[in-house]
Image (tube, rainbow, N blue to C red):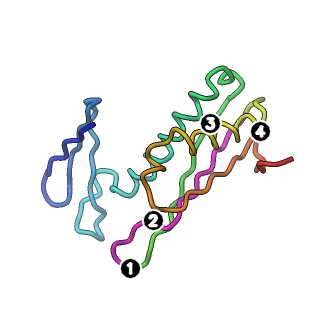
């Protein structure tokens, strides 16, 4: 896999991967950017969510008709000192539907343990949560 990232001036870059889709990256004004693209750290959090989301929907493929809504909220905590890498990433699946909580947790756990290459590539402690039909769901019961 290869991604070609091209400088567009100031702090802006455009990245194109094997898929052919462009991704615009830029720094915020605090880092002398113009804010005309996602920041690399936002993209990293989105990559964690997208990767585990793809895995979970693949694992639950026969149950997707039971899901009315699936949103993944990803919050990262960063170090204070440079480099300000993530020390923890909190991933919350917000799901509405008639799917069983245990089935969703199994898919999340399997995705994290076996399939999600993005989370496997990070040093940060990554924690997963599930909100099903407006209620936080524990793993056990």
Q: CA distance from mark 3 to mark 1?
A: 35 Å
Quadrant in which the N terminus appears:
top left
Determine the secondary structure under disc 4. Answer: helix
Determine the secondary structure under disc 1. Answer: loop
Q: Which mark is residue 81?
A: 1
Q: Which residue is mark 3?
A: 70
Q: Nearer the viewer, residue 107 or 77?
A: 107
Check contact, mark 3 vs mark 1: CB within 8 A.
no
Residue 47 vs residue 8: left or right? right
The image quadrant that residue 100 belongs to is: top right
Dot 2 or dot 1, earlier in sequence: 1
Q: Is residue 90 above or below residue 14?
A: below
Dot 2 or dot 3, earlier in sequence: 3
**Relative image position of residue 47 (x, y in whole percent):** 43, 46
Q: Which residue is mark 4?
A: 101
Check contact, mark 1 vs mark 4: CB within 8 A.
no
Residue interval drawn in magenta:
81-96
How packed mark 3 is, by other alpha carbons closer than 10 Å (few <14, some 14-19, many 20 or more), is some
Residue 2 vs residue 56: left or right? left
Q: CA distance from mark 1 to mark 4?
A: 39 Å
Name the outermost residue toward the front.
114
* Principal secondary structure, stretch drawn in magenta: strand
Dot 3 or dot 4, earlier in sequence: 3
Q: Which mark is residue 97?
A: none
Determine the secondary structure under disc 3. Answer: strand
Q: CA distance from mark 2 to mark 1?
A: 11 Å
Dot 3 or dot 1, earlier in sequence: 3
Q: Is residue 70 above or below residue 49?
A: above
Determine the secondary structure under disc 2. Answer: strand
The image quadrant that residue 30 belongs to is: bottom left
Q: Which residue is mark 2?
A: 86
């Amino acid at each position: 896999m290869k991604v070609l990232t091209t400088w567009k001036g100031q702090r802006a870059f455009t990245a194109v991967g094997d898929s052919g889709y462009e991704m615009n990256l830029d720094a915020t004004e605090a880092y002398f950017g113009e804010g005309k693209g996602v920041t690399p750290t936002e993209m990293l959090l989105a990559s964690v969510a997208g990767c585990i989301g793809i895995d979970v929907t693949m694992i639950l493929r026969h149950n997707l008709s039971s899901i009315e809504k699936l949103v993944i909220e990803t919050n990262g905590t960063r170090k204070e000192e440079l480099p300000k890498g993530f020390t923890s990433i909190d991933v919350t699946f917000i799901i509405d539907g008639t799917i069983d909580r245990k089935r969703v947790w199994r898919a999340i756990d399997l995705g994290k343990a076996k399939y999600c290459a993005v989370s496997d590539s990070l040093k940060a402690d990554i924690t997963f949560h599930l909100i099903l039909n407006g209620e936080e769901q524990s793993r056990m019961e």
